Amino acid sequence: MNRGEDRTPALGSVSPALEQRLQELWEGEGGLKGVLSTVDHKKIGLRYIVTAFVFLLLGGIEALIMRLQLAGPDLRLLGPEQYDQLFSTHGMTMIFLYAGPVLSGFSNYLWPLMLGTRDMAFPRVNALSYWIYLAAGIFVYVGFLGGNGPNDGWFNYVPYANRDYSPGMGEDFYALGMVLLGTSTTLGAANFIVTAMRTRAPGMSINRVPILLWGTLTANVANLLVVPAVSLAFFLLWMDRQFGTHFFDVRAGGQPLLWQHLFWIFGHPWVYAIVLPAMAFVSDGLPVFCRRPLVGYPLVALSTVATMILGFGVWVHHMFATGLPALGMSFFSAASIAIVVPSAVAVFSWLATIWHGRPVVTTAFMFFASTIILFVLGGVSGFMTASVPVDWQLTDTYFVVAHLHYVLIGINVFPVVGALYFWFPKMTGRLLDERLGRWNFWLMFIGFNVGFLPMHLTGLLGMPRRVYTYGPDMGWNTLNLVTSIGAFILAVGIVLLLVNVLKSRRGGAPAGANPWDAHTLEWSIPSPPPPYNFAVIPAVASRHPLWEGYLDEELRSSLDRGLLLDQAKESLGTSPLDALPDMILRMPEDTVAPFVLTIGLGVLFAGLIAKSWGLALVGGIVLTAALVVWLWPRRELREREAVRG
Amino acid sequence: MSASVDDIPEAGGQGRGGPASKRVVVGYGFWIFLLSDIIMFATLFASYAVLAGATAGGPRSQDLFRPGSVALETAFLLASSFVCGMATLAVERRNQRWTQAALLLTGLLGAGFLTLEIREFASLVERGAGPSRSAFLSAFFTLVGCHGLHVTAGLLWLGTMMAQFLAKGFRQNIRHRYLCFSLFWHTLDIIWVAIFNLVYLVGTTPYV
Ligand code: HEM
Ligand SMILES: [Cu+2]
């Protein structure tokens, strides 16, 4: 019998015997070895999500300390240097270690389930991206907790970040940490792109994919194109600081503006990369609770792509103010003008979906629906800063801080929490508590608006951002106190979320396969899904495989009968646009190589930061050895069977 | 209507044409990853272009570069890429001896390239034109050095490829890997051609 990858896969139906066989093939090891060696996208996805939430909490604690300091005038909880490190680390943590990775986590977990396949295209690379992300996070936090946090804001402008003005090691930790993180992001991006193009279930042509595929794919194409630029910029900065090169040093002909260009080529598309997948949560989740398909699917898909393309052209707007006294134009202001048209498409489609549907008000629905409100508010303030005279007034004031938090919390945190309520049952087999959920939602929603709406006014009254305190007679006292109170209410809301997760993980109501009666493939398999995801590879005939009955579709997807692929750890490769079956993919076994490689990389970077070349060399050797082991050809199935007898 | 799998004729048809290859997928992924590498080089080129005139009163490119030696380097690398192409043919024929010979020559030519490059760097530093002399030289050393590091990594990779062919023969997954390697090696060649033109040729053209 032909068992190689060149055979014709058989058709078959789901049966207990089949499930048993697949379980044996796919089940990973237990114990510590299993933890370090798994390549299962579900485990990796959950790790991403949990790690990102830990960073959200760390960034949140930093924010609360800042808000304590700013709650009244002339407080001296923190000195100026400490405040600088706090807001820089807060910004870096939220943007790089929370907002991006949390979305990678959800997509990592959900994509193969939504696409009807058994894993990502490159499971080991997937494990590697996670480990490197974790290493990067630990790396910068080792710096920060040792008193070496970045202190020049998250966009780290030179010349402030040059050695002359920032002699400590804070900038070095930040720079090298971002090089590490960039490696992780780039690897992840390549993996997402190939997964999207080559592993969708047969029949899931490109116009039948969930919006999350569009959102994450677009974001990752962008990452692939811009992250290398910023990693390189951080590397050059580090060389300037430690090896006396002069990329950004004017005295020897260097160009500080080069930093700004390299940073914003990346920074602007990155804004979209951390909101587009989150918007996709809303586009995929909202229809389920409105009991009807998304209105205007093709428009939403296209506008996702259009937003990103626009996003590439306009990085220079961050530097409008460079010729002007205040260096450092706001992050998000004019960005919003380019995003207006495509985002309006999304907003209208969501509103129309609610309007034409029969909404079931769950906590997830409330988070998704509130995203729309916050999106509109954030959009309006963005629109205001987009006009240049207004911008001159507002650049570097609290108006900008308010605006960027409306964008980031409104279009990242709220949909992410909604997504958690929505998909938690799939991940754990348990529903989150709805009563706690209401408290969770209202505290977050009220706290957020109480905290950040008044900030617009503080900004209009002239309070600059990034100041560690202010005098009592500026007229900012009450507003700041209100903001701090709001921030704490928001924080209580987030703590309730944690309580809910911890409580429901074991004790929540059992969810069953499809608690929301949703329509995409991930809801056709048990919760939590078995290690192989799908016992047979489904064949997809529409955009909503589980609603074809309701919607009286002519074509029906086939979920219980499909290609078997039970001879080895295998999955199906399909063609990029039409998703026609194309080849059998052999999926790798669990391996510790990605973990060991990351250890090597970590030691290498520790050596670099400590300027201990011996240590760096050891790291390099471990890294190379891990690579060789990784790449050393595994024994093929046939070979193994021959050995076995 | 139901069960659309049965309606998809392609579902079973792929076995006919011989081994369906994961190569397409591995190659696809590696190509995409290479793209990010190319973007990194593009960024380095851009930085170099911005800083090329920023000599801070130090030596200019016309004073430093020697086209002759660089032409030799280029010849080495191009030849190496060509021999790598021969190796690909040998791999397709499953010819162990020719594969090993061609890969060895590929590596030797690559090592020759590196030796010349290191000598050039050393002589620049000796003449007081090291990377910390001016922004121009910082950019030069980083761009060309980054390429050199890639070549070094490529040589290591090449060594493991030879070992794999030797130990395990011409198995499918090794050939896929080899495909990735050759993609990488040819890409380095292309990047070098860009460096040769934009850095050395442009840099040694006297002002008119
Ligand atoms: C509990 C919620 C939060 C509170 C109370 C909060 C508060 C603050 C405060 C007080 C600042 C410093 C303002 C200044 O002095 O200029 C700040 C800056 C910032 N925050 Fe938040 N924040 C919160 C959540 C977030 C989240 C979720 C994100 C992103 C996903 C975020 C991203 C940023 C960024 C990018 C900056 C700018 C840092 C810089 O100036 O370099 N924040 N935030
Ligand atoms: Cu922008």
Image: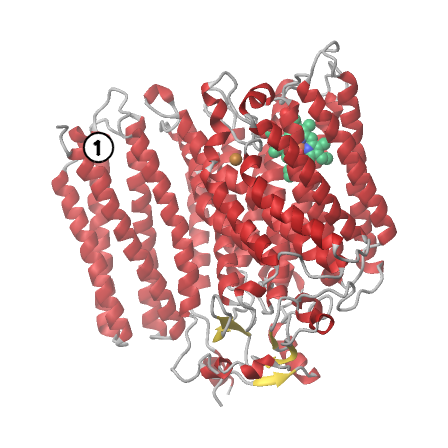
Residue A345: x %, y % from top left: 61, 47
Image quadrant assignment for residue A475? top right
Residue drawn at x 23%, y 48% is B193
Residue A79, horizontal then vertical, whole percent:
66, 18
Q: Give the camera-side residue of B112 and A401.
A: A401
Residue closest to the eye, A33 or A55: A55
Q: Taking A192 as reference, is B205 above or below it?
A: above
Residue located 53% across and 31% down the image: A155
- Taking the view exactly as shown, the residue that stands out farthest to the bottom is A1
Residue A545 at x, y percent in the picture: 66, 70
Q: Chain of mark 1?
A: B
Does residue A44 appear in the picture of this structure? no
Q: Is residue A95 left or right of residue B187?
A: right
Q: Is residue A637 left or right of residue A529?
A: left
Give the image quarter of residue B1. bottom right
Q: Which residue is mark 1?
A: B124
The amino acid beneath tag 1 is Leu
Location of residue A66 in the rendering, given as x and y in whole percent from the top left corner: 70, 26
